[in-house]
């Protein structure tokens, strides 16, 4: 979860369908262009919502796309104690279609895009920027109001405001931290959504027990690939002195500083220790050929380039960390963060190990960990999950600690896409699971045809693939972040 800054967000979500009556034309999105009478006045209807204001409208064929600000309480328990502007986007198809409520758990993109569930159900999409990610940050920022309940309450309030306009079925979705966010929203407001599709969502129930990650790294991929990665990572620590000189020159050239983490040395080790994790999070087994095969005899430049390409030497600078302060604050107060061992590296070469989230947040922001937060969510999902779908990638480290279902779950599923990474989606599942997942999403959205209801194998996305709207890349974030 802490990867090169130049790698931007881009994960997908699935849903898509059409009403039973319109099943014959559901696969023809051009037949429902979003230019019906419901679209003609949609902006007026949106702006009639108290606290809603327009930032920008961007054209896209078959849709209307709006970037909006919505006035939210800083503290939903005490609404009178100030407000802030939260950025949302609306990809409007038709009010007669279902709606997908998406968040990545970080910033919101202001470029029209369609998540996997939105394509599956051929619906509208509401996307929310997570509170405290700029520009959706109160000023001044009271960091104690950044928690999973407050964020879920943001979603609840947006849903309540938009439901009178988009009155068909709703499905929430998100990838990685967005999948976590969709889960927390369902936990606190289980009556809002008709279904949940959560992608690659970590579930760190006991923050200090991370042996599942060690087991994952001991067996992921092939031994040959693991050995290559481990050797490059170790070699980068063996060559710490000359490579840190390169790092210092790189930092000076780009005017990077290291006040938050404390030193260039701490930042260097953090980047290097992210290397193996970052590879499996964002790469596939076939990409092992890009890793130096003989690390001991590789040049300093080859070691530097491999580490920088996968981990990103810019990230643990002040400039790299600052945009993600809200994530690290939450990791250090509620979400938890992984710690893993490095059995292939001598202890003498590691000075700091995996550093805690506290090291990545400015010291003037107080933090105190709440161990009960994730235990509560985990217990709720096991005993109460209803219409919830979790999708994980077989080779994604974050899936080592995942959500699991208990006897109290109903019509809910956990599937794993073979060979895939942090970009796993429904499309990457084995055939029978892909069909079942697609069918359930269509059913939850109220647009499953009679054929799909009787035979899940007939289930397919209702909207055609759009190369611009339907991103299929993994959501790129600094490597040690979900």
Image (spheres, rainbow, N blue to C red):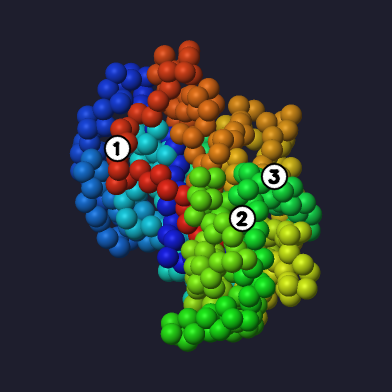
Asked where in the image residue 372 lies, by quadrant, the reply is bottom right
Give the residue at the far front of this rendering: 297
| Above or below 460: residue 68 | below
Asked where in the image residue 382 lies, by quadrant, the reply is top right
Q: Which of marks 3 and 2 precedes in the sequence?
A: 3
Q: Residue drawn 42% across and 48% down?
A: 473
* Residue 369 in sight here: no
What mark, if any, has residue 228 been given in the picture? Answer: 2
User: Is the residue marked by circle 2 packed among few (<14), some (14-19), or many (20+) residues within 10 Å?
Assistant: some
User: Is the residue marked by circle 1 packed among few (<14), some (14-19), or many (20+) residues within 10 Å?
Assistant: many
Q: Residue drawn 44% across and 37% down?
A: 14
Q: Are marks 2 and 1 in contact (CB under 8 Å)?
A: no
SS assignment at label 2: helix
Q: Are marks 2 and 3 in contact (CB under 8 Å)?
A: no
SS assignment at label 1: loop
User: Looking at the image, how many numbered discs can be counted on the residues?
Assistant: 3
Is 377 in front, or is 61? 61
What mark, if any, has residue 219 been given in the picture? Answer: 3
Q: Which of marks 1 and 3 precedes in the sequence?
A: 1
User: Is the residue marked by circle 3 packed among few (<14), some (14-19), or many (20+) residues within 10 Å?
Assistant: few
| Above or below 2: residue 186 | above
Is 194 in front, or is 340? 340
Instruction: Give how far across and how far down residue 299 sits, in percent.
Output: 53, 70
Is 300 in front, or is 197? 300
- Give the position of the N terminus as an image quadrant: bottom right
* Residue 309 in sight here: yes
- Give the position of the C terminus as an image quadrant: bottom right
What mark, if any, has residue 232 been given in the picture? Answer: none
Q: Which of marks 1 and 2 precedes in the sequence?
A: 1
Instruction: Give how far across and how far down residue 21 sits, in percent.
Output: 33, 18
Q: Which residue is mark 1?
A: 94
Per the model, the C-alpha gap separating discs 2 and 1 is 51 Å
């Amino acid at each position: 979860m802490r990867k090169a800054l130049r790698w931007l967000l881009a994960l997908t979500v699935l849903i898509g369908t059409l009403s039973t009556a319109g099943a014959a034309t559901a696969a023809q999105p051009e037949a429902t262009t979003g230019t019906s009478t419901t679209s003609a006045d949609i902006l007026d209807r949106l702006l009639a919502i108290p606290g809603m204001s327009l930032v920008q409208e961007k054209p896209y064929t078959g849709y209307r796309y709006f970037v909006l600000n919505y006035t939210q309480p800083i503290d939903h328990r005490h609404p009178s104690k100030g407000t802030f502007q939260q950025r949302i986007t609306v990809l409007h198809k038709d009010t007669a279609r279902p709606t997908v409520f998406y968040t990545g758990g970080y910033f919101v993109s202001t470029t029209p895009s369609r998540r996997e569930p939105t394509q599956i159900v051929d619906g509208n999409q509401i996307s929310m920027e997570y509170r405290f990610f700029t520009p959706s940050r109160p000023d001044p920022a009271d960091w104690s109001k950044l928690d999973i309940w407050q964020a879920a309450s943001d979603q609840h309030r947006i849903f309540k405001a938009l439901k009178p306009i988009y009155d068909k079925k709703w499905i929430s979705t998100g990838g990685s931290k967005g999948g976590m966010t969709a889960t927390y929203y369902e936990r606190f407001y289980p009556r809002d959504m008709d279904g949940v599709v959560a992608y690659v969502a970590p579930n760190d129930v006991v923050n200090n027990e991370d042996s599942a990650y060690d087991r994952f790294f001991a067996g992921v991929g092939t031994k040959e690939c693991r050995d290559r990665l481990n050797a490059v990572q170790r070699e980068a620590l063996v060559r710490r002195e000359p490579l840190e000189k390169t790092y210092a020159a790189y930092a000076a050239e780009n005017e990077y500083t290291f006040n938050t983490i404390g030193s260039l040395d701490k930042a260097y080790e953090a980047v290097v220790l992210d290397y193996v994790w970052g590879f499996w999070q964002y790469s596939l087994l076939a990409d092992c050929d890009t890793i130096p095969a003989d690390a001991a005899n590789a040049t300093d430049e080859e070691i530097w380039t491999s580490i920088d390409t996968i981990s990103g030497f810019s990230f643990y600078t002040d400039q790299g960390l600052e945009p993600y302060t809200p994530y690290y604050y939450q990791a250090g107060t509620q979400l938890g963060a992984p710690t893993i061992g490095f059995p292939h590296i001598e202890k003498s070469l590691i000075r700091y190990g995996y550093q805690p989230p506290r090291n990545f947040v400015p010291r003037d922001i107080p933090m105190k960990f709440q161990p009960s937060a994730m235990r509560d969510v985990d217990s709720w999902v096991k005993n109460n999950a209803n219409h919830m779908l979790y999708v994980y990638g077989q080779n994604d480290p974050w899936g080592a600690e995942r959500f699991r279902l208990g006897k109290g779950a109903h019509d809910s599923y956990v599937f794993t896409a073979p060979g895939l990474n942090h970009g796993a989606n429904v499309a990457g599942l084995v055939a029978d699971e892909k069909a079942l997942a697609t069918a359930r999403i269509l059913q939850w959205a109220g647009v499953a045809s009679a054929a799909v209801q009787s035979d899940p194998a007939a289930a397919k996305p209702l909207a055609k693939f759009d190369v611009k709207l339907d991103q299929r890349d993994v959501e790129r974030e600094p490597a040690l972040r979900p």
